[in-house]
Image (tube, rainbow, N blue to C red):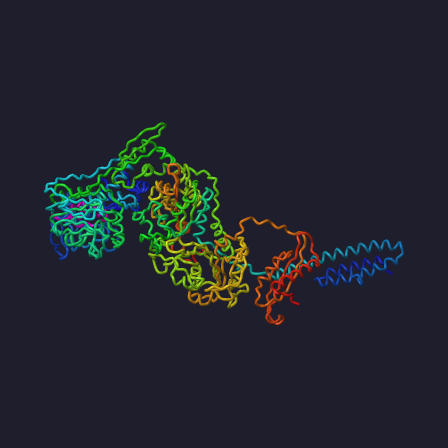
Amino acid sequence: MSTLTDELIDVETRALEELGRVADVDALEQWRVTYQGRRHGRLPNLLERLPALPVEERREAGRQANRVRSALESAYTERRAALERAHVTQRLSAEAIDVTLPGRRAHSGGLHPTTRTLREIIEAFRPMGFRVVEGPEVEWDYYNFEALNIPADHPARDQWDTLWLDSEDDEGKRPLLLRTHTSPMQVRVMEAQQPPVRVLVPGRVFRHEATDASHESVFFQVEGLAVDRGVTFADLKGTLYTFARRMFGPDRRVRFRCDFFPFVEPGVDMAIDCFGCRGAGCRTCGQSGWLEIMGAGMVHPGVLKRVGYDPDIYTGFAFGMGPERIAMLRHGIDDIRHFYANDLGFLEQF
Amino acid sequence: MRVSLTWLREYVDFDLAPEELAHRLTMAGLEVSGIERIGGEWDNILVGSVARLGPHPNADRLRLATVDTGAEQVEVVCGAPNVAPGQKIVFARAGARLTHPETGERETLKAARIRGVVSNGMICSERELGLGDDHDGILVLPDDAVPGAALEDYLGDVILDVEVTANRPDCLSMLGVAWEVAALTGNPVRMPSTEYAAEGDPITTADLVDLRAPELVPRYTSALVTGITVGPAPGWMQLRLQAAGVRPISNVVDITNYVMLETGQPLHAFDRAALAGGRLIVRRATTDEPLTTLDGRAHTLSTEDLVIADENGPVGLGGIMGGENSEVSDSTRDIILESASFDFANTRRTVQRHRIEVGGKRGTEASQRFERNLPITLPPVGLRRAAKMLVELCGGVAAQGIADDWPGRHEPATVTMTSERMRNVLGMDPGLETSARTLRSLGFDVSVADGPDGAYTITATVPPWRTDIGIADDLIEEVARIIGYDAIPVTLLPPTGEPDVPDPLTRLKDDVRDALARLGNQETISYPLVPMELLRTTIPGDAPQDPLRVWNRMSPDQEYLRTTLRGSLLRTLATNERGIGRESYRLFEIGQAYLPRGPRHQPEERTYVCGVLAGARAARSWIGGNAAAPDEMDFFDAKGLVESLLETINVRARYEAADDRILAHGRTARILAEDENRPIGVLGEVHPDTLAALDIRASRVVLYEIDLQAALSHREERDRAWQPVSRYPGLRRELALLVDETSPAGAVADIIRNFPSVMTSALVDVYQGPQVPDGQKSLAFSLVWQSPMRTLTDHEVDVAQAQLLDKLRRETGAVLRS
């Protein structure tokens, strides 16, 4: 008759052999019940006989029983892990997809190219201490013209063909207009505060002008104004240089030449070297090599006096530019009318 | 202004290449927008004269011309009808490059046999030389052309196209440009002579002119030149006028144009014999007085207009354009020459009123100059210069003296500038020597006073043609622009120490823009000027205030300032629907509505964000979305968007059912600021009638509109205090409630959300149907109960939920669904 020890070894051998043939989790469970099941498992059945053995035999059989039990347990754990790994691998391979199919897109929104350009301009000036303010689009003749050294019948008014509002004062004059530039805010800001002034004014402006590829009747401008003791033309140059390099790149060349605006003296036209030809001359720059992007100058003493600043104490500079023109140059847009036609095909490109 | 460099050299020397001169003028403020070369490629092309002309032996329409080139006589075949013996012509030798009259291509001329006769060159037309379009005959040169001279030496020129700014009427003259060149080169200006022999009878003003409207004519000068012979002007003058873009007409008219281009003073020559009464009357027009100007246009005048008249009526619109009836003709013998100073404002208004234009440009050569307020000293200068030419070039006899009743005396302006001011404005000082020399080179009379430490004061007498100079800073600009802005250093502004944050509304607008773009919406910007029809269709209320109207609208489509942005967005939607269109639209705009505040007041410009959603919620895709009728966006898409937006900008809002004229009843909500119950906007599905009126194809369009100024006043600007995250587990409970079907779910949800210990709550189901009693609806909430202090027990949650249910029943009538 075989001893309990022999039977234990026999069960171990069979169990491990059978475990080798187990192919899925169900069979594994079946195997576990067969050999390890608490009630009728073959190993527990054998173990139940242990207490009945004589002492000398019991020691040996007990040692053997522990060894077999732990061998089966670790074989079971190992097999289970292997089967689970195989199962996951199988599931994943069954779920394989065509990764070249398009993904689920989130709706993409976007900002208007004018907004983007305005922001870039503002961000370029902001570190130099310019604060953003905005002003009314429906303006008085006084702020748009008179206070800026452009009296009625002044030939310079030709530069700003004006849309007038249907409103008359006692003298039969039309005092209200759609501002032709953001410059009226120079006057409003200075009327409202004492120096130092350092503001940036983005905003919409209007012209009584037939539209074509380079003219809109409604567009945007950014005005800048800095007034304090000791603000000079040299500061104007430094400010605009800094802007140009932040906005257009560090190796951008800048040109300042004399120009005329009634509310500045001296007057300045600022140009940067052409993106297209880097100054050699091409169609974009009209063969000049330069792109005019901004008018500027030292605030005219007459304007300062009108707002109650003493021009002998305070000096300042002002500048103005059009974001559409800058966006057009950067993106090669050939027609300003795209900006406010609101064609999504255009807007969504930015 | 077209500036011929050949002509310019009469007044000033310069040895700069045209490109360099153009660059320096541009930098100094006189922008050169183009450089045109005449005759740069005229090798083997000479001045010749036609010595003899004979028939061609083999062709009726061709002739044989013998051309004298000074050095030799050459026989050429010529087919031009206008060739004649004795003419000075342009002769091209073999090897010359000419423009083919038909193809326009440039070809090299070769000796050729034409109908059996060898032609050793050819006589050229304008077109062949690239000078113009004329090919009806050969170009006949003025008599002073010398045979044998290279054509380039005779006709060659460089023309600068100069853009003159509004402050520089002086640069609408050759002399004005000459002063610029003088300053840039340091060379002097040669002023042309105005001296002439006046051999006629003395005249008084009354002989020539009756000045009845002195208030519109600050200065009126005139002269009398008798016995002139009208004919062509000398060749050199014709060439210069052509270079300047002015067509030669006759010696008298050409002289007035020439002197205008030279000095800047417009002039007019009247045929004295054609004037009833023999003198000019300068007066205001009478009401409805007719005048036909030289361009053939008939005008009806008013007392605002100034006319030059004779006893029979107007003969010209003063300072603007002559009339048809007093033109100088071939038989004219005696001339009254006018050189005046017309009031700039009145000239401008008359030009505007009668829409005077030439070649598409507003005004005339004369009016453009008068409008810029020419110097009061200029009329006699131009008058004398022209009289001198009429005497010397037209065989006329000038009367002694001129008519000039100007009572004023011109004190030349003086302006003082200090080195201190120079430094204050420019940030540098070029020094006394440079400043004084620069101003002198521009024609200023300069006196200087030295101070200590290199300080100085310059007192400058302004030359009469520089009407733009009035203050010290003007002198500073003169110095700066001539030495060049490049000479000014580059410095940076010091920090001001002032806050540089943008104003709150600007910041809010930016935040709203960013939030909506991030949430998938495209920003648009439209014209704030709209047609009345669009406003009528889209205003929220029934009785709109009259919108502000543009007096001189560009088109009816841009006549009124919008009082709402709704029309702009809906129209943008409609525009983009055209053609193929898109699956969906998510558009917004931030901009002003202009709310009238009564006549003679600026309107209130109120800032709104307005947006529309239309079309499919999800893009059509291979992933489950390929339905024939995809899910359309509806009210709740817009509401979710508005909720997310307001959360982002820190505005707490509530919603309640509302009505709006263009939105669908039952699908419209008013947006209220939670703290004060003030409306800040509206959201709803656009009424089908409105969609139809705007030709919108989409069947369902949701619109939202928020008053950003109102929203701003409810924006929590302070940083929110943080809430500790509870370390204790929460308990999830589902709660199904029955409420009356008309009772708003929002009230129930608000009570639950704000109930103590309710950490999160979500409305997960709204149901009406078989298991729910008639007239009621079931609302299912999923809530998490959680305490920051301890773990809640089931019992505690039961007690709290009972309290919540009690509150719900009392305030909304909601009961637990069993």
* Quarter where residue B396 is shown: top left
Is residue B77 among what the camera can see? no
Q: Range of the magenta residues?
A: B229-254
**Position in image of residue B95 (x %, y %):** 22, 47
Q: Position of residue B638 (x, y in %)?
A: 51, 61
In x, y percent, where is residue B108? 24, 49
Does residue A303 appear left or right of residue A23 in this picture?
Answer: left
Find the residue positioned furthest to the front. A170
* Number of numbered labels in the structure image: 0
| Percent coordinates x, y for residue B612 in the rendering | 47, 61
In this view, the residue in front, B621 or B428, is B428
Q: State yes or no: residue B246 in magenta.
A: yes
Asked whether residue A250 appears in the rendered view, the answer is: yes
Q: Nearer the viewer, residue B341 or A207?
A: B341
User: In the picture, residue A1 is in which quadrant?
Assistant: bottom right
The C terminus of chain B sits in image quarter: bottom right
**B544 up-or-down from B217: above or below:** below
Foreground residue, A245 or B612?
B612
Q: Is residue A350 left or right of residue B328?
A: right
Task: Report whether B221 appears left or right of B500.
Answer: left
Indicate left or right for B55 with A210 as reference: left
**Residue A79 sits inside the magenta stretch:** no
